[in-house]
Image: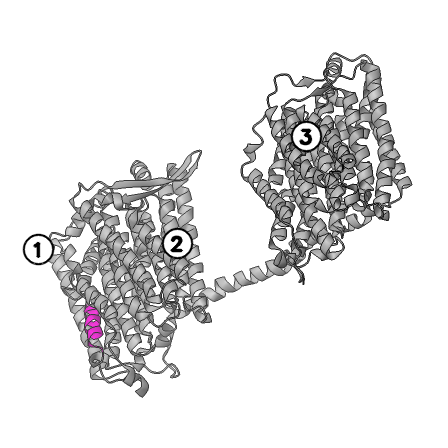
């Protein structure tokens, strides 16, 4: 709970810094504040009274784990994203927007009331719409922002309609009360089913699952690369956590209403995301599609409909976010040096920039789910939690998807060791630090997977 | 000293690691010193262990270092079994091994791979010690494979020479055939007895029904392993080719130690073999046949090392003949004496080659006696020992084998005497052609002739002393001895002794057999002397057309060609079929096909991403409709 207040306070500080003219310090202040938030978050572990604000939010251990993942990701992101804060005019605006996006994300992982969910999603989304268009002079950035907003608004309609239907049936927004209603033979089944279906649609859009994924490649590709990095890590983590919470807490007993649909969505998302990624020639776009397929894997945790699914989700989102942050940081460096993010720009990296090459290799291996790196155990825990009470069908689909993904992840690795490059890409000290941190986390989580999977 | 037993294999391993990792940091000569010192250290501890065993109560000691493999019901320890058989093997390996290390410091002095050579030698000694020390079949197998690797590396030591590489590969591949038999035998032991530890297996085996087919299968499979490693018919062809390695390697690995591993293995498993008389008969036949067969080839070889190689194959045949007739002590006895005199002969040959500047053809030698007197003297002693002239060591061990063979079946005795006859002949042929008469080499070689340095002659002298006196550890009762070795090894063979209570030979028979053998041997020496010294006969040059039988033997019965035609060629054909058809047209086509299919689907699927927001929303609406239909009208 203190995390939520602290982040909001940091956001307000950002606005104030603009007015009181100390915005040149705000970047550093934010990083210090985030590290502070991380520490305070852990202090709330095993909170005896997790429900706060008249039962609006619930800071149980799962929520705290997700907040920790979000804040760690945010710290790594800020450290690698110094370039977008170079433009002195808008430092404070951008910092504030991202901090508020983080506040929205925290609401989405800790809500105990469906209105809080909606508020969280909207805070996050509106900040991201603006951030996607933050490169004002760039046509692609503007287009990205516009598409994101248009389609986001479309999806929000479904989300809100779903909430309304559920409220119509249960006459409450409280997750626990909805859960009770669902368990005691609901009277208005048609309202409940319709509501759940609409919620599936709305939330599937947010995590960019097929067939609501169309926005993702265009938006990811058009937005400034740092914003893309943010969207595929923090936004995705928050959205899937929110999805997981709503469905496995409140709708667990009515799984018949969403299990079938969601299984198809998951399977198709995995296959299609991976398939289209194969043909991409830009690393940035490749990662956008691979992000879609990861959303499909993450859905397995919701379908698992048990607590180990939640544990797996925390593990997977951390592993995925760390690898993705590192990958995007590297792509950003390549973009800066070579002017584009095509695979060919990565040629010769292996010889000239061994650290970048090593970080790329480990990130790609982790994303592809190759043991002994973090991503492997992420997938392993996801699959085992799903298999606890399901058949093997969807896991086979997921494995086929993984096999396809190896093609494009390894293609990047292979490219790095082909050809020659004249120049050595300069790396700043902080980015080096982040890359080393990411490497360490990826390896450590893979070698000691029980670190995070102790259960809560 | 038994508690220090783990140091025995560890020291050579440390030597191997030190030299192979650090050879670029210290001087070349230090590598040889480190390697020799390590083996010497092992030798000192082995001596201590030997005296412990000698003064002990005859019970074996097991020293467990750590658990190696632990699964539900399969446990293997890295553990060492110390008993009389092990302690003797340790002395031979580290003792002869040390002398050969010493010798190599002189022999390999100018080789650019000096340090590498010593690291490989130490590696070999480590694995060989592991082989004889293990207290279960798996550790023995690990050592078994390890010595195979070291042998491969050392045969192909001069790897820039393609025929040498081929020889190394041949040794490795032929050994694989044997090893397959060995490991299948281990599997069968495990499924039959539920353990692979010697103590467990042997105590269970005693309770098995006599002549059970399982035991026969196990022993036959193990014997296939022994055939490969100890170069018996039909898997002996690699050993003569293995002479491509440096001569000290031939002496250590391909004469004194590694090739006797098969003998050790069967002696170790003696109780299993005693329960399978059929296998023992088979072992005796193979051994006897190999002894004669290889000896006939030896008569017509003109390469000094090839002669010794076929002689080794033949002598190994003797050892298996001994095992096959149930004379386990005799087999081990011959293993010991052979280790000394054959190592001596090989090192002597090395000294000759050294003096001749690399020449190995005995037709181009002659009269070397006065140029290299120490080599000449020691070589003579070795030759007398292998021929079985009393009181040299070969006489006692060979006599024991022949006596047992006669007791089981006189035909085995005839085979043995035939082999012994031919051995004497070709060894003296070699000796006379090399050292007697006049020098037949070039003038250059003649100027170059010189005695080898001290590091090479000292091992020769030590080994020649051993070759002379080693027989005294087993003086038979008829000659007034009390056969110390038999008593020392008795605890190892006590369980199988029950199965061989055949009648003792009459003393008069035994004297008669001895007399016949020695007389024949002396006649053969005189015959060879008459032919090669008095008549100065020198085998004709290769270009001269010879009669059928000499040609057949000089070409080793065309066995290599035969194997090539019936095994290698069909296998190559099958491999090329698999590659061209199954691999390229089958597996590759499927794999690449799947890859191409994925890329094609990808290229089509990405067209969905038009960039048109209107289309996106339209597609989403279609999706929503499908979901609604699925969810709501299905209920």
Location of residue A131 by image quarter: top right
Q: Chain of mark 2?
A: B
Q: Which chain is home to disc 3?
A: A
Q: Residue B16 vs residue B588: left or right?
A: left
Q: Quadrant of residue A98?
A: top right
**Of residues A68 and B332, the one drawn nearer to the viewer in this rendering:** A68
Tell me how far mark 2 sits from mark 3, CA to CA: 49 Å
Marks 3 and 1, how far apart at CA: 87 Å
Residue B486 in view here: yes
How crowded pointer 3 is (Cα within 10 Å; few <14, some 14-19, many 20+) is rated as many
Comparing labels 3 and 1, the label whose residue is closer to the camera? 3
Judging from the image, what secondary structure is the residue with disc 1 in? Answer: loop
Image location (x, y in percent) of residue B99? 25, 62
Residue hosting label 1: B480
Asked if badge 3 and badge 1 are on a common chain, one would say: no
Q: Nearer the viewer, mark 2 or mark 1?
A: 2
Q: Which residue is mark 2?
A: B146
Instruction: Name, please, the residue furthest toward the bottom.
Output: B443
């Amino acid at each position: 709970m203190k995390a939520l207040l602290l982040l909001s306070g940091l956001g307000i500080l950002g606005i104030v810094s603009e007015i009181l003219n100390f915005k040149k310090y705000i970047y550093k202040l934010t990083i210090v504040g985030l590290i502070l938030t991380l520490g305070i978050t852990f202090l709330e572990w095993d909170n005896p009274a997790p429900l706060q604000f008249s039962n609006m939010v619930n800071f149980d251990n799962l929520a705290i784990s997700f907040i920790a993942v979000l804040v760690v990701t945010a710290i790594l992101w800020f450290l690698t994203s110094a370039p977008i804060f170079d433009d002195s005019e808008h430092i404070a605006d951008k910092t504030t927007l991202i901090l508020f996006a983080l506040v929205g994300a925290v609401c989405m992982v800790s809500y105990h009331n469906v209105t809080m969910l909606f508020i969280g999603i909207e805070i996050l989304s509106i900040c991201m719409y603006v951030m996607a268009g933050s490169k004002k002079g760039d046509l692609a950035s503007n287009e990205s922002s516009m598409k994101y907003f248009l389609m986001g608004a479309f999806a929000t309609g479904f989300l809100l309609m779903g909430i309304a239907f559920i409220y119509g049936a249960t006459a409450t927004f409280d997750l626990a009360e909805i859960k009770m209603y669902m368990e005691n033979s609901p009277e208005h089944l048609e309202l409940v089913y319709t509501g759940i279906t609409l919620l599936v649609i709305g939330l599937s859009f947010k995590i960019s699952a097929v067939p609501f994924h169309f926005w993702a490649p265009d938006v990811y590709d058009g937005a400034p690369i740092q914003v893309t990095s943010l969207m595929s890590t923090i936004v995705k983590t928050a959205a899937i956590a929110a999805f997981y919470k709503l469905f496995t807490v409140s709708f667990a007993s009515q799984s018949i209403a969403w299990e079938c649909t969601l299984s198809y969505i998951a399977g198709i998302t995995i296959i299609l995301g991976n398939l289209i990624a194969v043909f991409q020639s830009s690393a940035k776009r490749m990662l956008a599609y691979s992000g879609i397929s990861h959303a499909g894997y993450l859905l397995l945790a919701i379908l698992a409909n048990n607590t180990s699914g939640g544990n797996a989700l925390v593990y997977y989102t951390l592993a995925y976010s760390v690898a993705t942050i590192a990958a995007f940081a590297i792509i950003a460096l390549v973009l800066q040096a070579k002017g584009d993010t095509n695979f060919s720009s990565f040629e010769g990296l292996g010889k000239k920039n061994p650290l970048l090459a090593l970080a790329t290799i480990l990130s790609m291996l982790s994303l592809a789910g190759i043991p002994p790196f973090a991503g492997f155990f992420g997938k392993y825990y996801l699959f085992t939690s799903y298999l606890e009470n399901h058949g093997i069908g969807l896991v086979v689909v997921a494995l086929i998807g993984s096999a396809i993904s190896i093609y494009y992840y390894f293609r990047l690795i292979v490219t790095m060791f082909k050809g020659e490059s004249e120049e050595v890409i300069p790396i700043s000290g902080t980015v080096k630090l982040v890359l080393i941190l990411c490497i360490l986390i990826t390896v450590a989580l893979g070698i000691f997977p029980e670190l995070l999977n102790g259960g809560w | 000293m038994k508690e220090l037993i783990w140091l025995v294999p560890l020291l050579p391993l440390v030597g191997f690691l030190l030299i192979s990792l650090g050879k670029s940091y210290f001087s070349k000569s230090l590598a040889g010193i480190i390697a020799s010192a390590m083996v010497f250290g092992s030798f000192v501890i082995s001596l201590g262990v030997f005296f412990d065993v000698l003064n002990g109560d005859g019970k074996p000691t097991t020293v467990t270092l750590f658990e190696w493999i632990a699964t539900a019901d399969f446990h293997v320890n890295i553990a060492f079994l110390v008993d009389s058989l092990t302690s003797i093997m340790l002395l031979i390996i580290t003792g002869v091994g040390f002398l050969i290390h010493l010798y190599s410091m002189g022999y390999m002095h100018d080789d650019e791979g000096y340090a590498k050579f010593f690291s490989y030698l130490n590696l070999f000694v480590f694995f060989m010690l592991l082989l004889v020390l293990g207290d279960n079949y798996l550790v023995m197998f690990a050592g078994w494979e390890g010595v195979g690797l070291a042998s491969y590396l050392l045969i192909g030591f001069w790897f820039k020479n393609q025929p040498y590489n081929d020889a190394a590969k041949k040794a490795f591949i032929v050994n694989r055939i044997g090893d397959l038999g060995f490991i299948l035998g281990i599997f069968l032991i495990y499924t039959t007895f539920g353990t692979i530890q010697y103590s467990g297996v042997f105590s269970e085996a005693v309770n098995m029904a006599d002549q059970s087919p399982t035991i026969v299968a196990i022993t036959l499979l193990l014997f296939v392993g022994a055939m490969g490693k100890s170069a018996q018919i039909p898997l002996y062809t690699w050993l003569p080719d293995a002479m491509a390695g440096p001569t000290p390697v031939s002496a250590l690995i391909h004469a004194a130690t590694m090739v006797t591993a098969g003998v050790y293995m069967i002696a170790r498993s003696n109780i299993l073999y005693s329960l399978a008389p059929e296998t023992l008969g088979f072992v005796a036949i193979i051994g006897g046949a190999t002894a004669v067969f290889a000896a006939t080839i030896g008569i017509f070889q003109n390469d000094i090392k090839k002669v010794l190689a076929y002689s080794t194959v033949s002598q190994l045949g003797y050892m298996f003949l001994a095992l096959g007739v149930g004379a386990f002590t005799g087999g081990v006895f011959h293993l010991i004496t052979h280790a000394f005199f054959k190592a001596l002969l090989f090192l002597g040959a090395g000294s000759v080659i050294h003096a001749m500047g690399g020449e190995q053809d005995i037709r181009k030698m002659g009269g070397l006696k006065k140029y290299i007197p120490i080599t000449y003297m020691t070589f003579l002693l070795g030759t007398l020992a292998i021929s079985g002239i009393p009181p040299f060591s070969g006489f006692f061990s060979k006599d024991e084998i022949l006596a047992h063979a006669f007791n089981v079946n006189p035909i085995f005795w005839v085979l043995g005497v035939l082999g012994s006859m031919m051995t004497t002949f070709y060894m003296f042929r070699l000796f006379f052609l090399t050292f007697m008469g006049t020098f037949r080499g070039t003038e250059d070689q003649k100027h170059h002739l010189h005695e080898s340095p001290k590091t090479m002659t000292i091992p020769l002298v030590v080994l020649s002393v051993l070759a002379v006196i080693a027989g005294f550890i087993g003086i038979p009762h008829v000659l007034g001895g009390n056969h110390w070795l038999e008593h020392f090894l008795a605890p190892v063979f006590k369980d199988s002794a029950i199965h061989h209570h055949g009648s003792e030979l009459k003393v008069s028979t035994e004297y008669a057999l001895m007399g016949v053998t020695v007389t024949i041997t002396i006649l053969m020496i005189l015959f060879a002397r008459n032919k090669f010294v008095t008549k100065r006969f020198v085998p004709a040059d290769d270009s001269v057309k010879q009669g059928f039988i000499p040609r057949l033997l000089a070409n080793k019965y065309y066995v290599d060609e035969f194997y090539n035609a019936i095994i290698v060629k069909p296998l190559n054909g099958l491999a090329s079929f698999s590659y061209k058809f199954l691999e390229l047209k089958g597996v590759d086509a499927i794999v690449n096909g799947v890859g191409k299919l994925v890329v094609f689907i990808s290229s089509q699927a990405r067209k969905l991403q038009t960039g048109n927001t209107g289309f996106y929303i339209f597609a989403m609406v279609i999706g929503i409709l499908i979901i609604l239909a699925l969810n709501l009208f299905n209920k």
